[in-house]
Amino acid sequence: GNKSINAKLVLLGDVGAGKSSLVLRFVKGQFVEFQESTIGAAFFSQTVAVNDATVKFEIWDTAGQERYHSLAPMYYRGAAAAIIVYDVTNQASFDRAKKWVEELKAQGNLNMVMALAGNKSDLLDAKKVVSEDAQTYAQANGLFFMETSAKTATNVNDLFYEIAKRLPRL
Ligand code: GDP
Ligand code: MG
């Protein structure tokens, strides 16, 4: 029969990487050029149908600022999935993403589904982070990797769909 799964999902990553924009694209199908900075964290929910289940994502979009770092465990603790976002035009944001992965591996759920999202893939001319490097890093650390664009919607639904497929079936 068709199963119903509730899954807590957290987005982590540098300020400006596009976490809120990915959520806005996924939940409302919208994009804004001047997305306001997230304060603390924001909550959203959205449902995805995969072949054998309906997954209701309970999404925590975190701020990313260092001064909110101590709050992060509240959002990733108990999470079934995490999306670690970096900006493909910003090498420092990729380094920051790796730090989040380390923290999740040390403190998060053992069977958490982790996705690495290289966002702003529409900005081809400004690209700094080589896809192969991110792919290699993701594979070595048990994440799956996608390049996304919240602006053009490229790979955004696919990202959540791939997570839904990978969640453990109860
Ligand atoms: P957050 O701090 O990680 O939540 O990042 P935001 O979602 O607030 O996005 C930061 C800025 O990047 C905003 O001005 C967005 O409009 C822009 N942005 C987000 N995603 C994309 C994208 O895929 N492509 C482009 N070109 N800009 C994006
Ligand atoms: Mg935000």
Image (cartoon, rainbow, N blue to C red):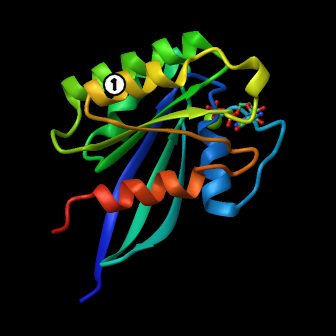
Above-or-below relation of 57 to 141: below
Residue marked by disc 1: 101
Q: Is residue 45 above or below residue 121?
A: below
Q: How many labels were placed on the picture?
A: 1
Judge from the rendering whether residue 3 lies leftward or rightward of residue 16; answer left or right: left
In which of the image's four quarters is ligand 2 placed?
top right
**Front-most of residues 3 and 145:** 145
Q: Quadrant of the C terminus?
A: bottom left
- The N terminus - image quarter: bottom left
Task: Tell which of 165 and 36 is nearer to you.
Answer: 165
Residue 161, image x and y in percent? Answer: 45, 60
Residue at horizontal 61 percent and vertical 61 percent from the top:
27
Q: Is residue 70 visible?
A: yes
Q: Locate residue 69: give its quadrant.
A: top left
Viewer can see residue 39? no
Given the current orientation, which residue lies at the most extreme bottom position? Answer: 1
Residue found at x 81% / y 45%? 32
Q: Amino acid at mark 1?
A: Val
Query: Which residue is at a point 26% across and 33% down the rendered structure image?
Result: 142
The quadrant where residue 71 appears: top left
Residue 85 placement (x, y as % from top left) = 52, 32
Decide: few, some or many residues near mark 1? Use Cα within 10 Å; few <14, some 14-19, many ≥20: many
